[in-house]
Amino acid sequence: MTDREQICRKAESFFNDLWMRGDPWELETSNWEHERYACLLAILDRPRYGRVLEIGCGAGTFTRRLAGLADKVLALDVSSEAVARARAAAQSDLKQVEFRVGNIMDYNLREEEPWDLIVMSETVYFLGWLYSFFDVSWLAAEMFEATRPGGQMLLANTQFESGEPLLRPCIIRTYRDLFLNVGYELNAEKILPGVKHGVSLEVLMTLYRKADHPTAGATS
Ligand SMILES: C[S@@+](CC[C@H](N)C(=O)[O-])C[C@H]1O[C@@H](n2cnc3c(N)ncnc32)[C@H](O)[C@@H]1O
């Protein structure tokens, strides 16, 4: 087995173990998470999107909110447990949503492009935990290429100074800057402060836009 395949197995088993035990981040039940989702929806500035890709959809709590804005949503998660929960929770009338099991690091973004909106919420730091910075940067560049000119990308990540090292603000800001470096332009940004389990934290939400006529290799 290659190193890459081993990492993929680790991701599958780690996230499946979490989802098997229930809703690990209380995404369905926490008032804070509901406030976060409302804020995420509010930053989206278009009445409707054509084709949407959601990376790391979990049990589909945000996907169900996103569905009303989109003609088509592909919601991807590495955990088959999460996807099974998402499918079970989705109303039968959510015909525009396809929940799919898949590791974004092995998914060919160009195969089903172009995307009018790509959403990656509370997921990139897990990629950065398991994969090299080069691999995450390559993914960011592929996401940019697979975004329709004029399309958007929404990145959201919790950050706080003490505690979980994956969520250190200096690291979260690095992911935020990475998507500018691959060519997206800043469309809107918001910091949502909050408290979860007695811990003060904030969510950095960035909406990017791909220019209508992007210049090749735009990095500045
Ligand atoms: C904290 S949850 C976020 C759920 C949702 N996006 C939200 O904001 O509420 C992170 C999700 O990312 C998924 N995930 C982690 N690594 C992934 C990968 N390499 N490919 C696809 N999904 C992944 C996990 O299984 C988990 O469901």
Image: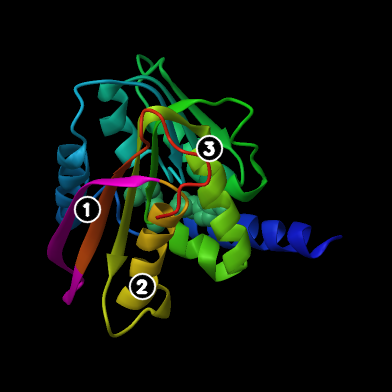
What secondary structure prevails in the magenta region?
strand
Report helix, strand or loop for mark 1.
helix
Label 1 within 8 A of ligand 1 by Cβ: yes
Say which label, 3 or 2, has the lower sequence index.
Answer: 3
Say which label, 1 or 3, has the lower sequence index.
Answer: 1
Q: Amino acid at mark 2?
A: Leu
Q: Which residue is mark 3?
A: 145
**Which image quadrant: the C terminus?**
bottom left
Instruction: Indicate the quadrant where residue 214 lies.
Output: top left
The residue at 64%/28% (across/down) is: 111
Report helix, strand or loop for mark 2.
helix
* Magenta segment: 184-201
Q: Nearer the viewer, mark 1 or mark 2?
A: 2
Q: Which residue is mark 2?
A: 167
Q: Is residue 22 visible?
A: no
Q: What is the x, y in percent for residue 76?
A: 51, 38
Q: Amino acid at mark 1?
A: Glu
Q: What is the x, y in percent for residue 124?
A: 45, 58
Report helix, strand or loop for mark 3.
helix
Q: Amino acid at mark 3?
A: Glu
The residue at 45%/28% (across/down) is: 115
Q: On residue 33, which mark appears?
A: 1
Q: Is residue 70 above or below residue 76?
A: above
Say which label, 1 or 2, has the lower sequence index.
Answer: 1
